Amino acid sequence: CALPISLMPRGLSSYACVALEACELERIDYRWLENAALDSPVWQQALLNGWKLHATRRELRERDLLTLTPTERYQAFVTQQPGLAKRIPQKDLALFLGITPVSLSRLRARLLAP
C-alpha cells in the first residue's frame, strides 16, 4: 500500500495549519502507529477509522469546491461551524472558501443587506 508523500520518510506536507487560539497538541509518529496497528486490533481499527475520516473529509471538500458557489460554500460553513465562523480571520476564511478576501467581504455585504 502506497503512502501519501507527506507520510514517507523525509516527506513534506503540501499544506499547514496555524493555531488561532491557545491549544495543546499531540504528535504520533506514523511508523509507530503502523507498528502498533500490526500488533493490536484496537490500534488497527483506530488507524482505519482515521483514514476513513480523512478520506471522507477530503471528498466532501473537493465536492463542495467543485459543485457549490462561493455563496453556498460560505452559507454551508456558517451553518456547520457557527462558532468557528465568528472566530476565524476573514482572510483565512476566504482562503478556505477558495475566494479572495475582497470577494468574501462583498458576499457578506450582499447577504446582510436588507
Image: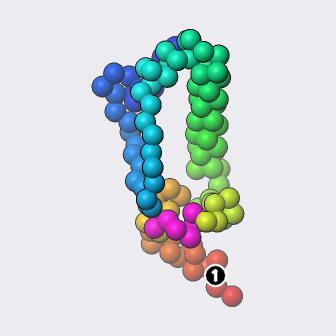
Residue 109 position in % (x across, y down)? 57, 80
Splitting the image into 4 quarters, where does residue 23 fall?
A: bottom left
Residue at image point 30% right, 25% down? 10
Q: Is residue 1 left or right of residue 13?
A: right
Find out whether residue 87 is within the magenta segment: yes
Residue at image point 46% right, 67% down? 89
Q: Identity of the amino acid at label 1?
A: Leu
Find out whether residue 77 is within the magenta segment: no
Q: Where does the magenta region start and end? A: 84-89
The residue closer to the viewer here, 36 or 53, is: 36
Residue 48 position in % (x across, y down)? 62, 24
| Local SS, label 1 | helix
Judge whether residue 61 can be spotted in this image: yes
Main SS category, magenta section: helix
Residue 102 position in % (x across, y down)? 45, 72
Q: Which residue in the protein does label 1 denote?
A: 112
Pointer 1: residues within 10 angstroms few (<14), some, or many (20+)? few
**Image: 56 above or below 101:** above
Q: Is residue 98 left or right of residue 14?
A: right
Judge whether residue 71 can be spotted in this image: no
Residue at image point 61% right, 79% down? 110
**Image: 17 above or below 79:** above
The quarter of the image holding the C terminus is bottom right
**Image: 20 above or below 109:** above
